[in-house]
Image: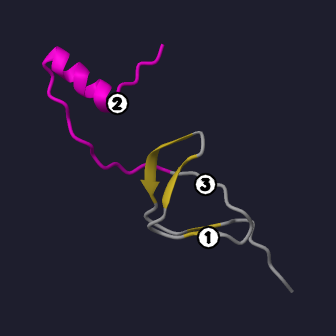
Amino acid sequence: MSRRCAGDALTGLSLLTGTERAGAQKAIAPLAVTLAAGVTLPAGSIAGNASDPTPQLVTLAAVASANALALR
C-alpha cells in the first residue's frame, strides 16, 4: 500500500479533511550522478531519476566525471 499522495489526489484529500494544501517548495539536496568518462554536467542542468522522472533537480554547480581520460 502506497502512502504517497500528490496532484489531484492530494487536493481531494485536503478537501475531505479540511486541511489547507501547502504549495510547492524549493529544497536543496545532495545528488549523485553517473557520468561517462570525460563528461561534465553543467550547472543549471535539469536532472532526474530514470526509474521515477517526476521529481526533477536543477544542479547548482558543474560536475565533472572522476574517470576522465588523460591522453598522452
Horizontal side, residue 63 vs residue 17: left or right: right
Q: Kindly state the secondary structure of the residue where label 3 is placed.
A: loop
Q: Quadrant of residue 38?
A: bottom right
Residues tagged 2 and 3 counted as in contact (Cβ below 8 A)? no
The furthest residue to the bottom: 72
Q: Which residues are magenta?
A: 1-30
x, y percentage for residue 14? 20, 22
Residue appearing at x 44%, y 67% in the figure: 44
Q: Is residue 19 magenta?
A: yes
Task: Give x and y (percent) for residue 3.
Answer: 41, 19
What is the quadrant of the C terminus in the image? bottom right
Q: Are marks 1 and 3 in contact (CB under 8 Å)?
A: no
Nearest the viewer among 64 and 2 is: 2
| Residue corresponding to mark 3 | 33
**Residue 6, numbered label:** 2
Tell me the crowding category of disc 2: few under 14, some 14 to 19, or many 20 or more residues within 10 angstroms, Cα based: few
What residue type is disc 2 on? Ala
Nearest to N terminus: mark 1 or mark 2: 2
Image colouring: secondary structure
Amino acid on which the number 3 mark rests in the picture: Val
- In three-dimensional space, the C-alpha distance between marks 2 and 3, rounded to whole angstroms, equals 26 Å
Spatial separation of the CA atoms under disc 1 and disc 3: 10 Å
Q: Is residue 49 above or below residue 22?
A: below
Question: Left or right of 10: which side holds 3?
Answer: right
- Residue at label 1? 40
Residue 20 part of the magenta segment: yes
The kind of residue tagged 1 is Thr
Residue positioned 58% across, 51% down in the render: 32
Residue 53 spot, x, y in % from top left: 51, 44
Kindly state the secondary structure of the residue where label 2 is placed: loop
Eye-nearest disc, 1 or 2: 2
